[in-house]
Image (cartoon, rainbow, N blue to C red):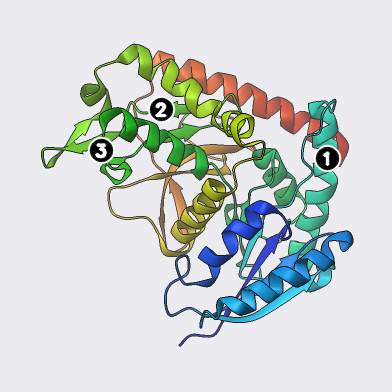
Amino acid sequence: MPSPIKVLITGAAGQIAYSLMYGISNGDVFGKDQPIDLVLLDITPMMGVLEGVVMELQDLAVPLLREVIATDKEEVAFKDLDVAILVGSMPRREGMERKDLLKANVNIFKSQGAALDKYAKKTVKVVVVGNPANTNCLTAIKSAPSIPKENFTCLTRLDHNRAKAQIALRLKVSSDEVKNVIIWGNHSSTQYADVSHAVVKQGGKDVPVSDAVKDDAWLKGGFISTVQQRGAAVIAARKLSSALSAAKAICDHTRDFWNGTPEAKWVSMGVISDGNKYGVPNDLLYSFPVTIKDKTWKIVEGLKIDDFSCGKMDVTTKELQEEKDTAFQFLQIA
């Protein structure tokens, strides 16, 4: 067997991390022959809870999980990492303005970016989950100048999976039959779920989703708003945020980042916008369709963007620019 890789999960006492750990530990993400050393980071008051989590991980008795380290110290958590999954963030509380949320999270992700820069391997692959995920990821990039920007990504795979699922439900097919949906922009209510390039397998061949659904009003209206508001709908029904589906999406994202995407299939991922061909300004952390090979993502190029899509993409771009400007005021970055 190869040597263990070192994987960090932050916010490790929370419900998303709890739902995530089995998938990370049992070989679903990094491969059935890849041992793992798992590092769990949370704040000091949660260390008692983490003791119980460590016990449960031990009790899984999965052969690939070699060592579990629970800590509240960044210098321990970030040392020699191969993968960092940054789940922990300050949640938005009642009465909190978005700028207050950004200010709190700038401090967290500035610190964690600096810790990655100082302690982790320069090849570390970073997945930012904690919201606002795009801007938190950009903050971490700015705080880790010695690590390539391309090593940092944020999670929009949950939105991608939600979009696939809505199409599959509408057409009464398996979600595996739907491919190449796109989430453009921010992981927020401005994101644009785009199926204008998506296909669904019907009768043994790939059919454009628009031809299969035959309802442009829904595809440009209710479908988009359902995906945009799905997280809020889950909270309204469950009284808790998405955890199971978020954990599955993190596993999907990380597995593809590590092992690559299948031929002729792309996924949605928040990545640095530098050099993109879709008119998105440089230096934003923006969700694009990407393919991945040899642990390196590449934005899918050459897709035709119609006026409707341009309008939707501009809205989410504007929000991301405003978030960045607010966050950078706190970061004091020119």
Q: Amino acid at mark 1?
A: Ile
Could you say where residue 304 lies in the image, as x and y percent from the top left? 34, 26
* Sooner in the amino-acid sequence: mark 1 or mark 2: 2
Asked whether the beta carbons under mark 1 and mark 2 sit within 8 Å of each other, the answer is no
Q: What is the quadrant of residue 37 in the picture?
A: bottom right
Q: CA distance from mark 3 to mark 2?
A: 19 Å
Kindly report which numbered mark, 3 or 2, lies closer to the viewer in this rendering. Answer: 3
Q: Amino acid at mark 3?
A: Val
Q: Residue furthest bottom?
A: 1
Residue 328 in view here: no
Name the quarter where the N terminus is drawn. bottom left
Vertical relation: 131 (above or below) 1: above
Q: Where does label 1 land, which residue?
A: 333
Q: CA distance from mark 1 to mark 3?
A: 48 Å
* Sooner in the amino-acid sequence: mark 1 or mark 3: 3
Q: Where does label 2 land, which residue?
A: 194
Count the marks: how many? 3
Of the pair 19 and 275, the residue shown nearer to us: 19
Asked whether the beta carbons under mark 1 and mark 3 sit within 8 Å of each other, the answer is no
Could you say where residue 282 lies in the image, as x and y percent from the top left? 61, 35
Q: What is the quadrant of residue 229 in the picture?
A: top right
Q: Residue at x 42, y 22 (%)?
A: 223
Q: Residues within 10 Å of mark 2 (few under 14, many from 20)?
A: many
Could you say where residue 7 lies in the image, as x and y percent from the top left? 62, 69
Kindly report which numbered mark, 1 or 3, lies closer to the viewer in this rendering. Answer: 3
Residue 57 in view here: yes
Q: Where does label 3 land, which residue?
A: 173
